[in-house]
Image (cartoon, helix red, strand yellow):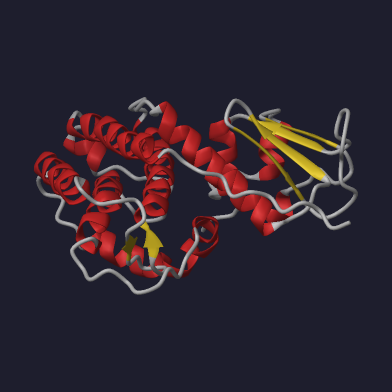
Amino acid sequence: MPPAKKRTRSYDSAKIRAAVLAQFAHVREAVEALTPEQLDGPTRLGEWTVRDLAGHVTMVLSSMARKLGEPEPAHRELSLLDWPLVTATEAASIDEDTRAVGTTDLPALFAETAARYEAALAYVPGERLVPTRFGAMTVADFLVTRTVELVVHTDDLNAATGAGIPFDRQALAACTRLLADALAAKAPGGAVEVRIPPYAVVQCVEGPRHTRGTPPNVVETDPMTWIRLATGRAEWATELDEARVGASGERADLKGLLPLMG
């Protein structure tokens, strides 16, 4: 008998919309408090300065507002679970667009971005298709991807500045779950159980399927460690050595599957 087909996870659209705005507000407040010296400081993202990174965060919302002003695509081209695995294909254009953002007045830029985003999303149904650089997606799916962008780059900003920007719980949950589900889609199977409490549990990797009792192959970690692994901000071996990842069983080695996003 073939394994049962896994159901695609659903998200509460209203909660995701609120989470995107909440996380953007956290970043906006922190960026406005940074000194010019901090804004000109380096990040772990190549040549990007903190100012460049802050400008990119505004793109996370402004791109959606801009795309909603374009004609609706005729067909859906990209599913939610496809998105993490294709992001690396546009790294060069994302870098170019980021460097083109005017960041001289960041407080004004963040205020304008928030206002345009809220106005654009005010009456848009989640089922509407929106063009993205990776293909047409539903608004509801694209909003979930915005939680990933915001959470990941909030962590980048914290690493660069020590600002201690908080994470909205709903945004962190959605980010964690999408990246966990993307792993299961990349390596389908039931041989390994990946636990990321309190937000996600997925089964992945081909092999003997576990049905009851304690699974023979288990990986467990916290949400932020998982997000850093999935996005290439952390190395599997390092996190394992530092006990931020627990892995038991001969198949519980995910280093060949990570990162999921470039």
Image coordinates for residue 37, horizontal then vertical, percent: 21, 37
Q: In this rendering, would 235 be left or right of 116?
A: right
Task: Please report the residue visible at 19 percent of the width from the left and 28 percent of the height from the top.
Answer: 33
210 versus 102 height, above or below: above
Image coordinates for residue 91, horizontal then vertical, percent: 42, 65
Q: In this rendering, would 255 be left or right of 105?
A: right
Viewer-proximal residue among 29 and 123: 123
Quadrant position of residue 171:
top left
Q: Residue furthest bottom?
A: 74
Viewer-proximal residue among 37 and 223: 223
Task: Please report the residue visible at 27 percent of the width from the left and 59 percent of the height from the top.
Answer: 98
Q: In this rendering, would 88 be left or right of 92?
A: right
Image coordinates for residue 78, horizontal then vertical, percent: 47, 65
Task: Please report the residue visible at 21 percent of the width from the left and 55 percent of the height from the top.
Answer: 65
Viewer-proximal residue among 222 and 6: 6
Q: In this rendering, would 2 be left or right of 179?
A: right
Task: Please report the residue visible at 26 percent of the width from the left and 58 percent of the height from the top.
Answer: 63
